[in-house]
């Protein structure tokens, strides 16, 4: 029996890839999948290579696995994901402890590659990025009560700071019927929440249907009986159209939640980023979303310290978030990615200024989040339980995605992961709520 452990790093889209690889491995009776890498014959590391911090985490994880191999606890290390797609030669030349590298289009070969490494072969399976994910492929879900569903791969946006098109290729959308089959299958197995992901979900369908088809997809998925929550991530605000807003507003299944990666508000910076939509258009669109979908929670991600970002541009961004008051917000300090246009732009910002601007945005957002949460005290909300500890049942509301958003703490232990229940919010903090079960 070959004991195998998979470490998944990076985003939810990477998590889907990891679950697909585990699905392939689980079909082989000679392979036993375990959680603890320290006890595994084979360690598979699904890496992220999007920004510098992610690359460092990936490399550190490979080095730690290498220590286990050196100590005789591990026979083989396989590295896959975005880092291998982007830095194939560097990994092979500089990390001799790695026995195999697999690109993002070769996940289905994981079992054969694993066995080749045990025979002493060093394997390189990195090819051009492609996308062949179908509902018929088995997946071993990380959680049984919610599942990420990748509706497309790759991106055509070509933002000047982003390396994703080089790593994951151009837009590849899945057929709508195939997505429906996967979601219906998960729901039949008891999954309560489906989370749609892609590099840009609002571009879904452009390549295969000749038009954006996210609204059509939502209408179709909304028909699935027993689907409780349907959440949309990575939706570019400039492509949120009236039909999409209407479908969301009239569905009990689609969560009142949108993830809108704005990145910046300054027209000058947005142009340098190669992002469409001016500041005024963003404000108009976001106000319409809030007007048409009362109570919707809006999440965004921002980049501070982009080349050429002046004090005036930064003040513009502060004014923007104070006007919009996003319910959830994440900030990245600009990372100069090689082979991207922005890496050669003039006006690169010193790291200390990036950090100062990052801290300022987070300080403002903490206050916004606290005030927003305080308004929930005394109100009833639906909660999906994610975790049970010795003291609490910990869950999320419809307004929160897993791992990145707020949590609700309930002082009860008689529930299970995946339970849906109602509670009254009794207290609120910056990023957490305290609730009491409604009998």
Image (spheres, helix red, strand yellow):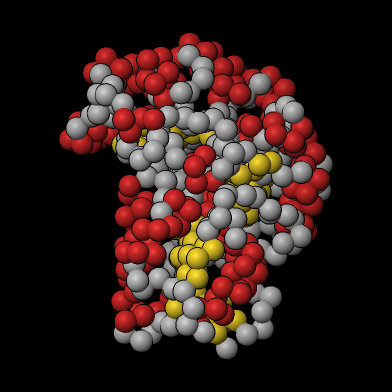
Height in image: 165 above or below 77? above
Is residue 402 visible from the viewing direction of this image? no
Please tell me in which quadrant of the rendered image residue 432 appears. Answer: top left
How far across and how far down the image is residue 80, in percent?
49, 61
Up-down relation of residue 78 to residue 191 (above or below):
below
Front-lying residue, 26 or 209? 209
Instruction: Say which of 205 and 78 sits in front.
Output: 78
To which quarter of the image does residue 317 belong? top left
Please give the count of numbered marks on the rendered protein. 0
- The residue under the point 77% across, 32% down is 209
User: Where does the image place residue 141, in percent across and percent down from the top left?
Assistant: 62, 63
At 65% from the left edge and 50% from the top edge, which residue is drawn?
131
Residue 278 drawn at (x, y percent): 48, 14
Q: Nearer the viewer, residue 174 or 32?
A: 174
Classify the position of the N terminus by image quarter: bottom right
User: Does residue 99 appear in the picture of this structure?
Assistant: yes
* 357 left or right, relative to 394: left
> Residue 363: x and y, percent?
28, 33
* Residue at the spot 50% in from the left edge and 31% down from the top edge: 158
Q: Give the camera-side residue of 414 and 318.
A: 318
User: In which image quadrant can residue 115 be found?
Assistant: bottom right
Q: Residue at x 32, y 64 (%)?
A: 94
Q: Is residue 72 above or below residue 212?
A: below
């Amino acid at each position: 029996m070959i004991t195998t452990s998979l470490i998944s790093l990076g985003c939810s889209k990477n998590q889907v890839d990891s679950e697909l690889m585990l699905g392939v491995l689980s079909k082989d009776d000679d392979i036993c999948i375990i959680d603890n890498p320290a006890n595994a014959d084979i360690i598979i590391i699904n890496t992220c290579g999007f920004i510098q911090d992610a690359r460092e985490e990936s490399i550190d994880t490979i080095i730690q696995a290498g220590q286990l191999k050196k100590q005789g606890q591990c026979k083989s290390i396989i590295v896959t994901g975005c880092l291998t797609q982007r830095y194939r030669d560097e990994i092979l030349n500089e990390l001799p402890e790695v026995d195999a590298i697999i690109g993002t289009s070769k996940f289905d070969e994981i079992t054969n590659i694993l066995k080749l490494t045990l025979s002493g072969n060093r394997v390189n399976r990195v090819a051009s990025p492609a996308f062949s994910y179908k509902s018929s492929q088995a997946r071993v879900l990380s959680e049984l009560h919610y599942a990420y569903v990748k509706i497309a791969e790759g991106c055509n946006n070509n933002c000047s700071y982003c390396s994703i098109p080089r790593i994951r290729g151009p837009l590849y959308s899945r057929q709508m019927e195939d997505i429906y089959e996967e979601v219906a299958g998960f729901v039949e197995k008891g999954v309560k929440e489906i989370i749609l992901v892609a590099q840009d979900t609002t571009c879904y369908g452009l390549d295969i249907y000749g038009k954006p088809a996210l609204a059509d997809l939502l209408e179709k998925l909304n028909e699935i009986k027993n689907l409780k929550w349907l959440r949309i991530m990575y939706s570019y605000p400039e492509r949120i159209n009236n039909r999409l807003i209407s479908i969301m507003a009239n569905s009990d299944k689609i969560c009142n939640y949108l993830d809108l990666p704005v990145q910046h508000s300054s027209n000058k910076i947005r142009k340098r980023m190669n992002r469409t939509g001016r500041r005024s258009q963003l404000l108009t669109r976001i106000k319409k979303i809030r007007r048409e979908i009362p109570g919707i929670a809006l999440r965004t991600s921002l980049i501070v310290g982009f080349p050429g970002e002046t004090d005036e541009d930064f003040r513009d961004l502060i004014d923007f978030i104070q006007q919009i008051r996003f319910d959830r917000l994440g900030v990245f300090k600009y990372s100069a990615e090689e082979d991207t246009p922005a890496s050669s732009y003039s006006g690169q910002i010193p790291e200390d200024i990036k950090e100062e601007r990052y801290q300022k945005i987070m300080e403002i957002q903490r206050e916004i989040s606290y005030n927003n949460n305080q308004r929930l005290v005394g109100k009833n909300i639906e909660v999906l339980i994610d975790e049970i500890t010795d003291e609490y049942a910990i869950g999320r509301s419809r307004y929160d995605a897993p791992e990145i958003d707020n949590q609700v703490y309930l002082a009860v232990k008689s529930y299970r992961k995946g339970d849906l229940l109602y509670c009254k919010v009794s207290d609120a903090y910056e990023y957490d709520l305290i609730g009491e079960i409604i009998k």
